Image (spheres, coloured by chain):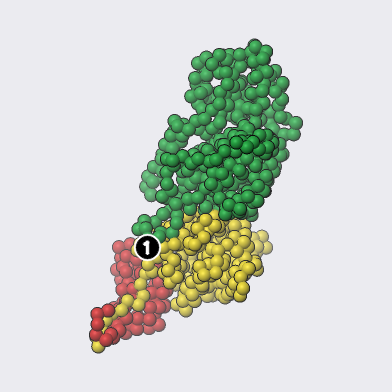
Chain colours: A yellow, B red, C green
Amino acid sequence: MTTVLKNVFDRPVSLKDVSTHFCPGCQHGTAHRLCAEAMDSLGVQQRAIGVASVGCSVFLYGYFDIDVVEAPHGRAPAVATGVKRVRKDDFVFTYQGDGDLAAIGTSEIIHAANRGEAISVIFVNNTTYGMTGGQMAPTTLPQQQTSTSPTGRNVASDGYPIRMAELLSGLEGVSYSCRVAVNNPKNIMAAGKAIEKAFRCQVEQGGFGFVEVLTTCPTNWGMNPLKANNRVAEEMIPYFPLGVFKDIAPMGQEV
Amino acid sequence: MPSNRIEIDPIYCKGCALCTIACPQKLIEMSDALNEQGYIPAVISSGNLARCTACALCARMCPDAAIRVFKSVETDGGQS
Amino acid sequence: MKRLFVKGNEAVAMGALEAGCRYYFGYPITPQSDIPEYISREMPKLGGTFIQAESEIASINMLLGASACGVRAMTSSSSPGISLKQEGISYMAGSELPGLIVNICRSGPGLGGIDASQADYFQSVKGGGHGGYHIIVLAPHTVQEMYDLTMLAFDLADRYRMPAMLLGDAVVGQIKEALVPHPYQQPSDLPTKEWAVSGKQGRSDQRIVKSLFLGDGELEAHNWRLHAKYKQLQDNEVRCETEHVDDADLVVTAFGSAARIVKTAARMAREEGLKVGVIRPITLFPFPIATYQQAAQTVKKMLCVELNAGQMVEDVRLAVNGKVDVAFYGRPPGAGSLPTPEEILVQIKKHCG
């Protein structure tokens, strides 16, 4: 018997060997890695087309070693619809933040979901507009202070944060909708499985899969990465519960 | 028998310290020197490395995919 | 060849299918709904995809996505809907994506009305959206041209990797007249779309369709490259119809359905012995600057007629650069505001005097 060192954890192949522009502790990087791992696992990197959105997630093509189309703000599900209808055998996913998907892009996400487009949507919810400097997002929590809600989100005038995973699960076209977090290794592993499941739902069944990922934005929250990470469990998960809200066969297919 | 090993890439690490809370044994610490990017990176001492179980939780927690994990395994003699 | 009696909007749909367009994304709006209606019926028979989107915004972005995959794809709408599409058109221009956008223009501003209008001239030829770009703009004036120019629009869009717009209006969209459909012949020298996303399929390079350029000097270089293409269009792709310009004292100029009225009025004037010529731009971008400049050497005056309060006239005046006077006659669009040939004849006589 001899002893060797076996590489048991490495960067996924679908992720490029580059450092990201994300701030320290920003969990966009975690969500990126999980998407790349799922693409590796399903063997779809060579037929993957990503649709980038606007915000911190715009540099998708800089980090994933795949073909990418950049969409206007909020329009990624419509762009992905056009891509997928042409490239039916390819794997198509959008990666969108909360301002992009849950504010300016509500029309596009709801109707792509309702049509049951065979695409996967990764929705990164960090309760703020990161790229533009931490303004109030549709997912900003009640009383949360942001650069445009300096005294805290006032639900009487601003409304309540939108729970997108639950909202979309009410649509017939949605096959899979869930919410995950990446604030500890256990949740990260569950998130990885959920993303892989959403991707598999498209690849194997032609279904619409949606994964909302709760992440941190330490810079705009004004917290260090560890405090920001704690906020996910303390404040976000109580309002945005983790779980699977829908998991059925795509429309028109036998369960 | 060589010990398990983790490699924290000093270029990718941004010093967020999330790996330090992910490690069940709290084996990872923050360096006292800046890396090339100007961050204070995470490090693991050789003493602590000897206790690493290669569970890879630190690597999973890392938002920058900066950690590679190697586990010491026994083989039946062939090169692997 | 068989002659058909069809609406202009149907001719657009027929031309698109004949040119190999198999992807249509649209949203209903008067007076262009015959286009999605025809295509929703006929395109699936050819294995194509028709999507009635949730909005004009979604449909232009579906077009962006399909076009990024290298196929011929289109959308159609009318003025208020085209306003909504401007965001996507700007992104397509910035991302160098071909694609056909049909505007069967109606009257405005705002909800305006559903009557024929040419009030979207500025919006079409000056870019329309943000960022300082141009798209190819073709202006059909007959049902036959609705068919022919739809095909040409796809070819030009593919050749120059930029969006092309067919700018019609309620007259040319809704009118029924003879169409001789003919088979589409793709130019043999159209460039292959090696930029189109397809999944890497073993390629070492990524294909990225984008309009964000943050590197030092990158965006400026990108913009200069776009503008070099506009110059190429000006040099190579101007199309223009002229009638009796050589001996004319007065040139009347108009595009699209206004040109139908103008051509009739000019013939009436000729019958009365007036030396009247016509210049009808077929490409609004690129604009037939040289044709106007040449005419300005010999004619005494020009008269620009539009179904608006005066838009193309500015480009005509820029083209002749003060060499001759350019008068304008037009009326803002709305029910009852379409000028008659007799009304134009009065103007011709006024300016011939």
Residue A79 location, x and y as percent? 53, 55
Would you place residue A128 above or below residue C246 in this image? below
Task: Classify residue B26 as left or right of residue C187.
Answer: left
For the question of whether residue C6 can be seen, the reply is yes
For the question of whether residue A34 can be seen, the reply is no
Residue at 52% over, 25% down? C318
Residue C203 location, x and y as percent? 37, 58
Between C203 and B63, the one lying in front of the other is C203
**Residue most extreme to the front:** C1
Q: Quadrant of the N terminus of chain A?
A: bottom left
Residue C351 location, x and y as percent? 64, 15
Amino acid carrying label 1: it is: Lys
Residue A211 location, x and y as percent? 54, 68
Between B79 and B44, the one lying in front of the other is B79
The quadrant in which residue C353 appears is top right
Task: Classify residue C176 as left or right of residue A117.
Answer: right
SS for callout 1 = loop
Residue at 56% over, 23% down? C242
Label 1 packing within 10 angstroms: few (<14), some (14-19), many (20+): some
Would you place residue C107 above or below residue A69 in this image? above
Would you place residue B24 above or below residue B17 in this image? below
Q: Which residue is mark 1?
A: A16
Q: Quadrant of the C terminus of chain A?
A: bottom right
Would you place residue A195 above or below residue A107 in this image? below
Between B53 and A120, the one lying in front of the other is A120
Q: Chain of mark 1?
A: A
**Residue most extreme to the right:** C336
